[in-house]
Image (tube, helix red, strand yellow):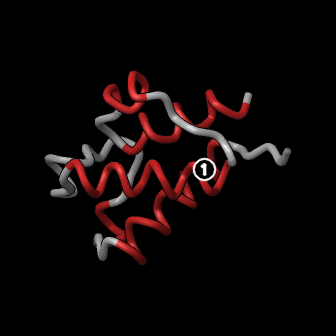
């Protein structure tokens, strides 16, 4: 099992947002709200969760997933899975 730093997790989330969801890279920061700032919808959020699951081989629980609002929330949730 490979361990990832929060920075590596953030970079992976950023790559997904910029390359797959065509979000402007300058909008992607830890404080950005996925829904309000980046204009994503729940389907996009599920897609991010699935991609992060493939990245880490770990699955976010529905309870954890519902708490995610910002990019930092994604990073912290994924980091919590691999600790």
Residue position for label 1: 9
Q: Secondary structure at mark 1?
A: helix
Task: Please tell me whether residue 71 is drawn above or below residue 41 in the rendered image.
Answer: above
Instruction: Identify which residue is drawn at 65% across, 40% down.
Output: 58
Instruction: Identify which residue is drawn at 29% across, 57% down.
Output: 44
Q: Position of residue 51 (x, y in %)?
A: 51, 58
Closer-to-camera residue (47/10):
47
Instruction: Identify which residue is drawn at 67% across, 48% down.
Output: 56
Q: Position of residue 65 (x, y in %)?
A: 39, 32
Q: Which image quarter is the C terminus in? A: top right
Q: Position of residue 66 (x, y in %)?
A: 31, 29
Task: Please tell me whether residue 40 is drawn above or below residue 58 in the rendered image.
Answer: below
Q: Where is residue 31, by image quadrant?
A: top left
Left or right: 44 with respect to 14? Answer: left
Q: Mark 1 packing: few (<14 Cα in 10 Å), some, or many (20+)?
A: many
Q: Residue furthest top?
A: 63
Q: Residue furthest right?
A: 1
Closer-to-camera residue (80/10):
80
Instruction: Identify which residue is drawn at 38% across, 57% down.
Output: 47
Left or right: 66 with respect to 13? Answer: left
Number of numbered discs overlaid on the protein picture: 1
Left or right: 51 with respect to 65? Answer: right
Q: Position of residue 38 (x, y in %)?
A: 22, 57
Q: Which image quarter is the N terminus in? A: top right
Task: Please tell me whether residue 77 is drawn above or below residue 23 in the rendered image.
Answer: above
């Amino acid at each position: 099992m490979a361990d990832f730093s929060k920075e590596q997790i953030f970079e992976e989330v950023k790559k997904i947002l910029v390359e797959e969801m065509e979000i402007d890279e300058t909008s992607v920061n830890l404080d950005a709200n996925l829904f309000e700032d980046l204009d994503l919808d729940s389907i996009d959020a599920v897609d991010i969760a699935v991609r992060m699951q493939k990245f880490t081989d770990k699955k976010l629980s529905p309870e954890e997933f519902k708490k995610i609002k910002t990019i930092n929330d994604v990073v912290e949730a994924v980091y919590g899975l691999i600790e």
